[in-house]
C-alpha cells in the first residue's frame, strides 16, 4: 500500500537506510564533538553544540538498533531541536512513495533507486521521550 | 510608569493565554485547570488594581467569584458558565488593548454582575454578560521574545567562535592592514555580544512604581522602603516576579499591617512599614518583603487547617512550625475571614510558590506574632550572569554556583568507600562525597585531591575535583526543553571555548 509522497532526506545509520521528511530538518552538519552526561535519559547519547546552544542527541542504538557517526542531522521538533547522528546522507529533496511497515519508531518503508529507507515516525519518537 | 505598564500588559496577556488554554479542560471538569483559571483571574485582578485600572480589577474579581462557586461545586461547568468565562476573558483582553492605546476600557461590570447573579446555584443560566468582543490590534512596537534574543546570542556566539579560528589564519598573512581590520571586527563582535546580554537585563525598579502605588492606594498609613532597586535582573525573571510580589505586598497591606489604633495599642509607631530588599550575591537573587505588622498567628493556621481537613486531629497536635508555614502555600488556604476585592481568598501564596518554583527558586516565611512577617524569595539567577567555581574532574570541566560553595579543602586522608557511597572525614566529621566525575562519561576513578564543600541547612556534601580552575562569570542557559529538569544540573554556560560547561546544582544531591 502506497501513501502520498513527500520530500524526504535519506541517510544511513550504521548500514541501514533511514529517511525523514525534509520539513523536520533544520540543518545537516559534519563532525562535531559529543558532550555526554550520565544522568541523561536512555533516549539520548549526549549533546552537540550548535550555534552555542546545546542540542540533545538521539540515542539511535536505543530507537533503531544502529549507531551512526560523523554526520549530524538537526531536526526541528515542537520541543526544540534534536540531533540525529548518521553515517552518511544519501540524498535530499527526493520524493519517494512510502509503503507501510511495522518497524518501531518508523512509519513505513520508502523505496528509492539505491535501496529502501525506513521513514522515521517523529511523533512516536517524541512521544516515547516525553512519556519517559 | 511605561515600563511597569508594559510588564502589566505582558503579564496579563500571559494570564489570558493560560485561561484560553485551560478552558477546554475546565469544561471537562478538570480541577487543575479550574485552579489555573482562578489564579489567572486573581493575578489580573491584583495587577490591575495595583496599576489603578479599577474596572479591569473589578471585572476580574467578578469572574473570580464565579470561579469560586465552581471550586465549591455549587455550580457546574456547563456551557453557559464556560461561555460567560470566555466572554469575560475576551472582554479583559479587549480592555488590555484599550489600556495599551490609552483609551477607556469600556468594560461593563454592571452587566457582568447581572449575568453572574442570574446563575443560580445548581440551576441553569439565563443570560450573558454584555462584554465587548475581542478587539483586533495592530502593534505599534516590535516586541522581541526572550528566546529570539537567545537565538541571536547563539548566532553572535557562533561568529565569535569563527572569529577565533580566523585569528590564527590572519596571523599567517603577516599583514598590518588585515590585522587591524580583524581586530576592529573582533571589537565590534564583542560589543554586540555584550549588548545582547545587557538587553536582557532590567533594573528591579521597573516593579517598584506599581508596588508603591499599591501601598499608597490602600488607604492605610504605610511607609514603603526599598533597598537594591538598582539591581538588574534578567527580564524574564522580572516579568515572572511581578505577580508574586503583588500578592505578597497585598497580603502585607491587607492582613499584616494593623490600623493606626491597633498599632498604637500595641506600642508600635502609628504608621506601618513595608520594606523590600533586593540583593544579588554570587549568582543568587534574594528578595525579602518585610512588614512590621501583626505577624502570622500559627495557632490560627493550625485551627483553620484542622477545620479545612488539611490536618487531622493528631497531625494538628504534632505539627511543627515549619510545616505550619507550608500550609499557607496550600491552594485556597486562608486565615482571613474577610474576602476583599484585593486579597483574602488565600490564593496568593500558592501563586507565589508556583511562580518562584517555576523559576527554580524557593520561598521562605519567617514571622513573629505581633512583630511582623518576612517573606524571602531566593532564586538562581537563571539566564543571568552567574559567578561559578570551575573545577576539573577526569575529562570534564564543571561549574558549581559560587553561592552554594562553603569552602574548598585539599584532602589529606583517603576517601572511604562503603558500597556505592563515598565518605570523607574532615576535622573529625563525616562528609558524604559525590564523585563529580560520574556526571561525565566515562566516569573517573576516585582519588581526587580536592573537595568542594557545599551546605544545605545542616547537611554538607563534598564534590570531588582533580583541579580547581578558578572563579568565572558564566551566562547560565537552560537545558534544552526535551531534557529540562535533569536532576543535579542547573544548566550550562559557554566560556571562551566552544565547549559547554555544565553547571551542577549541589542542592539536588543534598537531602531535604
Image: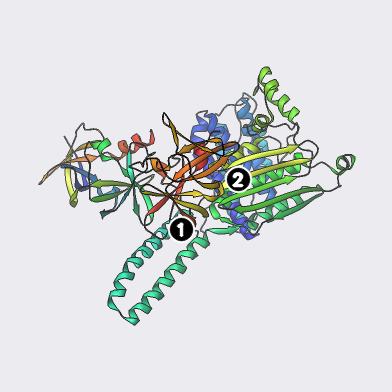
Work out which residue is located at the far top of the displayed protein and give it.
B314
Point out which mark residue B378 bears. 2
Q: Alpha-carbon neighbours of circle 1 within 10 Å: few (<14), some, or many (≥20)?
A: some
Task: Say above or below: B42 vs B238.
Answer: above
In percent of the image, x 49 and y 52: which residue is there?
B389
Q: Earlier in the sequence, mark 2 or mark 1?
A: 1
Tell me the element at label 1: helix
Q: Mark 2 to mark 1: distance in Å? A: 25 Å
The answer to whether residue B166 is left or right of residue B388 is left
Q: Position of residue B266 (x, y in %)?
A: 87, 39
Mark 2 or mark 1, whichever is nearer to me: 2
What residue does disc 1 label? B149
Q: Is residue B133 visible?
A: no
The residue under the point 33% across, 38% down is: A43
Q: Which quadrant would the N terminus of chain B be assigned to in this image?
A: bottom right
Numbered label tally: 2
Q: Quadrant of the C terminus of chain B?
A: top right
Give a yes or no on whether discs 2 and 1 share a subunit: yes
Give the structural element (helix, strand or loop) at label 2: strand
Amino acid at each position: 500500500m502506497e501513501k502520498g509522497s513527500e520530500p524526504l532526506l535519506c541517510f544511513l545509520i550504521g548500514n541501514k537506510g533511514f529517511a525523514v521528511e525534509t520539513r523536520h530538518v533544520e540543518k545537516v552538519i559534519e563532525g562535531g564533538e559529543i558532550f555526554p552526561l550520565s544522568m541523561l535519559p536512555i533516549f539520548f547519547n549526549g549533546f552537540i553544540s550548535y550555534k552555542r546552544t546545546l542540542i540533545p542527541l538521539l540515542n539511535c542504538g536505543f530507537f533503531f538498533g544502529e549507531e551512526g557517526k560523523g554526520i549530524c542531522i538537526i531536526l526541528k521538533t515542537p520541543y526544540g531541536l534534536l540531533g540525529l547522528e548518521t553515517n552518511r546522507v544519501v540524498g535530499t529533496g527526493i520524493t519517494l512513495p512510502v509503503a507501510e511497515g511495522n518497524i518501531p519508531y518508523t512509519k513505513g518503508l520508502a523505496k528509492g533507486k539505491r535501496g529502501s529507507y525506513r521513514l522515521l515516525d517523529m511523533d512516536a519518537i517524541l512521544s516515547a521521550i516525553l512519556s519517559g | 510608569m511605561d515600563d511597569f505598564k508594559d510588564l502589566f500588559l505582558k503579564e496579563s496577556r500571559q494570564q489570558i493565554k493560560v485561561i484560553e488554554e485551560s478552558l477546554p479542560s475546565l469544561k471537562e471538569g478538570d480541577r487543575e485547570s479550574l485552579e489555573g483559571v482562578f489564579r489567572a483571574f486573581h493575578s489580573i485582578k491584583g495587577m490591575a488594581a495595583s496599576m489603578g485600572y479599577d474596572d479591569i480589577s473589578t471585572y476580574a474579581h467578578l469572574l473570580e467569584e464565579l470561579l469560586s462557586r465552581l471550586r465549591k461545586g455549587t455550580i457546574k461547568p456547563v456551557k453557559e458558565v464556560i461561555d460567560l468565562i470566555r466572554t469575560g476573558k475576551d472582554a479583559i483582553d479587549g480592555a488590555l488593548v484599550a489600556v495599551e492605546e490609552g483609551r477607556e476600557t469600556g468594560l461593563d461590570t454592571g452587566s457582568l454582575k447581572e449575568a453572574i447573579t442570574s446563575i443560580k446555584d445548581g440551576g441553569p443560566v439565563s443570560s450573558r454578560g454584555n462584554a465587548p468582543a475581542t478587539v483586533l490590534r495592530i502593534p505599534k512596537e516590535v516586541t522581541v521574545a526572550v528566546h529570539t534574543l537567545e537565538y541571536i546570542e547563539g548566532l553572535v556566539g557562533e561568529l565569535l567562535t569563527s572569529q577565533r579560528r580566523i585569528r590564527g589564519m590572519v596571523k599567517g598573512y603577516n599583514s598590518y592592514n588585515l590585522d587591524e581590520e580583524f581586530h576592529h571586527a573582533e571589537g565590534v563582535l564583542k560589543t554586540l555580544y555584550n549588548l545582547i546580554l545587557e538587553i536582557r537585563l532590567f533594573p528591579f525598579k521597573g516593579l517598584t512604581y506599581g508596588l508603591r502605588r499599591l501601598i499608597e492606594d490602600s488607604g492605610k498609613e504605610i511607609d514603603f522602603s526599598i533597598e537594591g532597586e538598582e539591581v538588574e535582573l534578567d527580564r524574564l525573571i522580572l516579568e515572572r516576579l511581578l505577580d508574586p510580589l503583588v500578592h505578597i505586598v497585598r497580603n502585607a497591606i491587607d492582613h499584616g499591617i494593623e490600623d493606626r489604633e491597633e498599632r498604637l495599642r500595641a506600642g508600635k509607631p502609628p504608621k506601618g512599614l513595608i520594606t523590600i530588599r533586593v540583593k544579588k550575591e554570587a549568582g543568587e537573587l534574594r528578595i525579602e518583603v518585610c512588614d512590621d505588622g501583626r505577624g502570622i498567628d500559627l495557632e490560627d493556621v493550625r485551627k483553620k487547617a484542622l477545620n479545612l481537613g488539611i490536618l487531622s486531629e493528631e497531625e494538628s497536635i504534632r505539627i511543627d512550625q515549619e510545616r505550619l508555614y507550608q500550609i499557607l502555600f496550600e491552594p485556597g488556604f486562608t486565615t482571613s475571614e474577610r474576602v476583599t476585592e484585593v486579597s483574602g481568598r488565600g490564593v496568593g501564596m500558592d501563586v507565589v510558590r508556583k511562580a518562584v518554583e517555576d523559576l527554580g527558586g524557593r520561598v521562605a516565611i519567617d514571622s513573629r506574632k505581633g512583630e511582623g512577617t518576612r517573606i524571602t524569595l531566593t532564586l538562581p539567577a537563571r539566564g543571568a550572569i552567574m559567578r561559578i567555581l570551575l573545577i576539573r574532574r577526569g575529562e570534564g570541566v564543571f561549574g558549581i554556583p559560587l553561592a552554594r560553595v562553603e569552602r574548598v579543602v585539599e584532602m589529606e586522608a583517603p576517601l572511604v568507600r562503603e558500597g556505592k557511597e563515598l565518605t570523607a572525614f574532615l576535622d573529625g566529621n563525616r562528609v558524604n562525597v559525590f564523585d563529580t566525575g560520574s556526571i561525565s562519561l566515562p566516569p573517573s576513578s576516585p582519588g581526587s585531591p580536592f573537595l568542594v564543600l557545599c551546605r544545605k541547612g545542616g547537611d554538607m556534601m563534598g564534590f570531588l575535583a582533580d583541579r580547581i580552575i578558578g572563579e568565572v562569570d558564566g551566562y547560565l542557559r537552560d537545558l534544552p526543553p526535551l531534557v529540562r529538569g535533569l536532576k543535579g544540573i542547573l544548566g550550562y554556560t559557554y566560556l571562551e571555548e566552544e565547549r559547554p560547561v555544565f553547571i551542577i546544582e549541589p542542592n539536588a544531591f543534598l537531602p531535604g
